[in-house]
Image: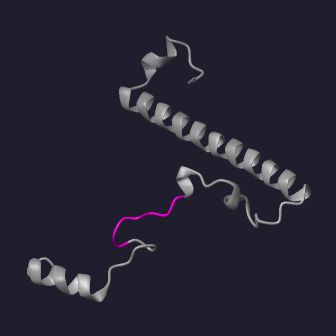
Amino acid sequence: MLNQTPLSLNDYSLVDIKDAFVGYKINQQVNDRVAWETARFISFVSLKAAGNKKMKTPNDLMVFDWEQKDTKKGTRGNKWTKQEIEKLKKEKPGWFK
């Protein structure tokens, strides 16, 4: 995984090893996403060639977890309304300064 011999790991601190492991896991996740998106695109093109007129984009075939809209309040897809902001100001008067 880290392409290191056991003796060479003695030269690294635990933080270095953890950083290498986290970087490896992130790289694996990116590679997995690319593989899934490639498979979805190939399926989309195959279905479009067969005459499926309902699908306009590969997302119509399948939406992945990492493509889901973020539902946290205050994000681009779920903005605060003026009424909600006023309500928060009344509940926590010293919070907005």
Query: In which image quadrant can residue 27 be found?
Result: top right
Q: Residue at horizontal 49%, vertical 33%?
A: 20
Q: How many marks?
A: 0
In the rendered structure, the answer to whether residue 96 lies left or right of residue 50 reads left
Is residue 3 depicted above or below 19 in this figure?
above
Answer above or below: position of 5 versus 1: above
The answer to whether any part of residue 93 appears in the image is yes
Image coordinates for residue 79, horizontal then vertical, percent: 38, 78
> Where does the N terminus fall, quadrant-wise?
top right
Start and end of the magenta stretch? 68-74
Main secondary structure found in the magenta portion: loop
Q: In which quarter of the image is the C terminus?
A: bottom left
Residue drawn at (49%, 63%), measured in percent from left and top? 69
**Is 80 rendered above or below residue 43?**
below
Here the colouring is one colour
Q: In this view, does 82 lie to the left or right of 32?
A: left
Q: Looking at this view, is 83 or 38 the one in front?
A: 83
Q: Is 16 part of what is drawn in magenta?
A: no
Q: Can residue 96 be seen in this view?
A: no
Q: In which quarter of the image is residue 50?
A: bottom right
Q: Position of residue 72 (x, y in %)?
A: 36, 65
Q: Where does residue 46 sit, x and y in percent of width and height?
A: 86, 51
Name which residue lies at 28% across and 88% down.
Answer: 82
**46 or 96, which is in the foreground?**
46
Measured from the top left, where is residue 87 in percent x and y? 17, 83
Left or right relative to 30: residue 71: left
Residue 71 magenta-highlighted:
yes
Q: Identify the residue at image location x=77%, y=52%.
A: 41
